[in-house]
Image (cartoon, rainbow, N blue to C red):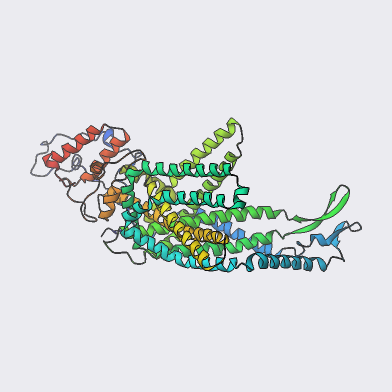
Amino acid sequence: MCATSWSFKRLKKPTKQFSNLYDPPSPSQPLLSKPYPSPPSEESQPDPAEPDSTQYLQITYNYGPRPFKDLPFVIIFAIFVLSTFAFGIFAVFNRNPNSSLVSSYVYDSNSTSCVKSSSSLAASPSFSRVLYYDFFSYYYNSHLGSSQVVKDLIWTLVITVILSVPFALLLLLLLKRYTKQIVYASLPFFVVIPIFFNVYWFVACTVSSSCSDAFPLVYRILVLVLVFLIIGIIVWIIVVNWHRIELTVKIIGVASEALWWNLGLFVVLPLLTLGLVVYFAPIVVFLVYSRLNGKIVPRESSGEYSCVWKQDSWVPAYYALAIVTMLWSATVMLEAQIYVISGTIAQWYFSKEDSAPRRSIRSSVRNAFGPSSGTVCLSGLLICVVRVVRAVVDSATQENVPGIVNLVLRCCVNVLLSAIDFLNKFTINFAAITGEAYCSSARMTYELLKRNLLSAVFVETVSTRILAGITFIFSAIYAIVVCAILNAVSDLGADSYFVAVLAWVILIVVLGFFVHVLDNVIDTIYICYAIDRDKGEVCKQEVHEVYVHLPISRNHRSSAAIRTIGTSPSTCCNNGDGFQDGTNPRLLISSFLSASHLFQFPTSGSLYFLTYISTTPHMNFHL
């Protein structure tokens, strides 16, 4: 069983060269039978500044009690949340009930203030409410109620929400058992469905007189050609990445198998999202009521006075505080979900074959909102800052602000954001496995992947694109079926397309959430596979058989013969044979290959080294 207690041990052995330097001589040997040993030189002493290559050899899932990490960020996040709720409650009780009655106030020159007008004191509010109610009733009865669009829309959306869960489970089961068939059967639809919709709208708009009059033929042809060009780009992407399709199929199959053993995630993760919505509800109410904090004051314009509404000076600051808190809370919940996924999948990976550990999801949730809550808050803060800054940069780019200074600033910001993305990659996954702090997890993840010739920025992007395409196809087929059923059983006419599009949006959102979970499963298994390679163990043989083919970079096609050097076909936690002095040969090979990769040693030298150690008699071991 791979699930052992987690620890970091420096595996140091006393070398035979200095094991008996100052031991007293035995009685059977004369005092001068050995030459006087020279003291160890400075070159033989390890440099304390250099990281020990065997420092992290015992990384595995931490089942024991975890200490609290990154506590300052939990405190800062709690201050933001408590301040938002405290000022929000104050805004509710301190609101001005006359905020909507500005038109009922007139300027009084005697008191130099605004007072209520006696003529509009009672008529104005009731009249506005009645007018709004009459307008809404007229619009509903004339446009929505008579055609029953709302009724059909509600029923369609409710049925779609109910069916979305079985659809997601069915898709997971199909990807688990028939991964290759599903992927290869979906690839033609990546081209067929866009072509179908492109030709369909062109013909429908040409036949319809109203559409053809509003949209001239020249513009229709331009849009048709543009869409076909986009379809051509999709075809080109498929052709370029064709050699990675088979690897993608295996990766999706392994991830689907892992997710199938942990179906409880599809209950916990939506509940966490629902909890976030419930948490946001009072903040939205506070934002609405904060607008009602102020007073009606006179304003002079062209020598005449009028009454206007003036908000309190603290309201804009509260808006900024509440929005920042909501954004940070959203990213914290996103990182917490990734933490729960990673912790659950890691426990499955390091458990026995064909079994899932008990209460793995519960322990992951407890760790995410307990000892590792500071790590989750810090990761969420970084993600929030990156997305906000990137949105600002994108908006500035769309405005086409001239100047070399703006161009240099955008380049620097993009480099900084890319560096943060690089730092954050796999960090929360590693923290969920080990319980380490954020900075330690980032550093140790990078060193773990570097030692094992694995990429810190690349797992397999084709799998994400294919999964997104599969969800699009499933949703599009469902929307076509919904539209056909609505046209057959109702008289909605053109409104059936609107209802079908909304059903398509709901289903693709649900299936998109499924793809998000599966992507995080792939990343977590990647880290677990790296931990296995680092220890020379194989906890999940089927995972090693797939992930060993991953390239170390985007432009590198790995060889199975070289990439399998660091793995062992032995069972979990069985390190196989080694040297007579206890040295693990796989670690020696991994270190040599890491050095040859970093310093660009010739490939022939690496192969010569492997040939030498495999043919030398005193170095016989099982690879």
Image spot of residue 460 (x, y percent):
37, 47
Image spot of residue 525 (x, y percent):
34, 53
Indicate whether 137 appears above or below 55. below
Nearer the observer, 614 or 60:
614
Residue at x 33% of width, y 59% of height: 176
Indicate whether 57 appears above or below 160. above
Indicate whether 37 appears above or below 99. above
Residue found at the far right of this picture: 110
Image spot of residue 578 (x, y percent):
17, 47
Nearer the observer, 332 or 167:
167
| Relative side of 102 to 459, left or right | right
Quadrant placement of the N terminus: bottom left
Image spot of residue 168 (x, y percent):
41, 62
| Relative side of 246 to 201, left or right | left
Residue found at the far left of this picture: 28
**Residue 136 sits in quarter:** bottom right
Residue at x 79% of width, y 67% of height: 127
Residue at x 60% of width, y 31% of height: 403
| Relative side of 222 to 100, left or right | left
Residue at x 28% of width, y 37% of height: 45
Can you see residue 209?
A: yes
Can you see residue 372?
A: no
Nearer the observer, 557 or 11:
557
Nearer the observer, 571 or 238:
238
**Residue 283 sits in quarter:** bottom right
- Tally of marks: 0
